[in-house]
Image (tube, rainbow, N blue to C red):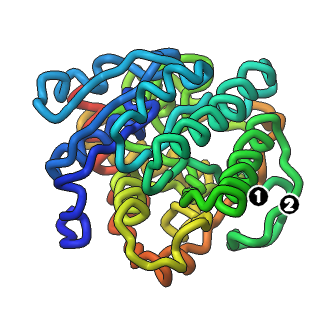
Amino acid sequence: MNNPQFEVLQSAKILVTGGAGFIGSNLCEALLELKATVVCLDNFSTGKRENISGIMEHPNFTLLEGDIRNLEDCHSAVAGVDFVLHEAALGSVPRSINDPITSNEVNVSGFLNMLVASRDANVKRFVYAASSSTYGDSEALPKVEDEIGKPLSPYAITKFVNELYADIFHKTYGFNTIGLRYFNVFGRKQDPNGAYAAVIPKFVMQFMNHESPVINGDGTYSRDFTYIDNVVQMNLLALTTSNEEALNEVYNTAVGDRTDLVQLTQLLKKYLSEFDPKIKEVEVKHGPERAGDIPHSLASVEKAKKLMGYDPKYKIEDGLKQAVSWYWENL
């Protein structure tokens, strides 16, 4: 993350909500490397203590155990903070279909609590995790920020509502936000376990155990798989950009490439078999399509390039090599 623009963070205090999660913990580490002071707020419903075990003793790091559904916890967390990276959320389309109420409480009510607390604390900038699910039933490819369809899941609705609230807080209170629509983020520290595990770590673990991964549908569904270091770069740019035009906007956070699920399993087999040749023989199976899934996802990242100087360094192959190596050493 060698960018002179990021040096302004050396004297900054930054709150990362969901900082013990997959993306949040990577952001905490990157900020500490830049010599920022970091506060992590997490209730450990999906975050993991091992994700932050390596930074718990860092003199610039503070862990606050709390819940964004509790406004008092939000007020405590933002005290004296310059910037907020809001990552706390309940992800997963299937989880939201199974339990829409809890997803709404965390992703909408919790988000509003964080906006209110941040506004009250005069936070300079509020950067939040939005989602590519906001594009819903729009069939246009690539996805361009100002052209969205109707949401296809409760999760997608909650993330769209986040964008609406952020926009209103700017227009009503002059509060500065930036939303980052994440596209299928993967990489180190992403949990392969549980009912709602993301496809890449789940398939990696199954291949490593010589179990057959199951692709939902015929495998032609495609995604703009985005390596974690690209996402970290976007968050740091959003925190530090001095371009006034870049504020109070939403941005696709992706690579601008798409890979279908058959191609994905072939790449995973290729890279994992370098560690274990038997993985080449593991069969891939197919199951029914999953409710609420969009067929194809491909981002245009031109807006982020133009307004914030975004330059994604990791294509799918580069990211998968890094991720597979990390999983091999850590699982």
Residue for badge 2: 149
Relative to 183, does residue 141 appear above or below in the rendering? below
Residue at the spot 41% in from the left edge and 29% down from the top edge: 77
Residue for badge 1: 135
Relative to 174, does residue 271 appear above or below in the rendering? above
Please identify the quadrant where the N terminus is shown: bottom left
The residue closer to the viewer here, 155 or 9, is 9
The answer to whether residue 317 is visible is no
Circle 1 packing at 10 Å, graded few (<14), some (14-19), many (20+), is many
Question: Of helix, strand and loop, which one carries label 1?
Answer: helix
On screen, residue 127 versus residue 140, left or right, reads: left
Question: Of helix, strand and loop, which one carries label 2?
Answer: loop
- Going from N to C along the chain, the mark reached first, 2 or 1, is 1
Disc 2 and disc 1: Cα gap in Å? 5 Å
**Residue 282 position within the rendered picture, expressed as x and y whole percent measured from the top left:** 47, 31
Circle 2 packing at 10 Å, graded few (<14), some (14-19), many (20+), is some
Residue type at mark 1 is Tyr
**Residue 311 position within the rendered picture, expressed as x and y whole percent measured from the top left:** 38, 74
The answer to whether residue 208 is visible is yes
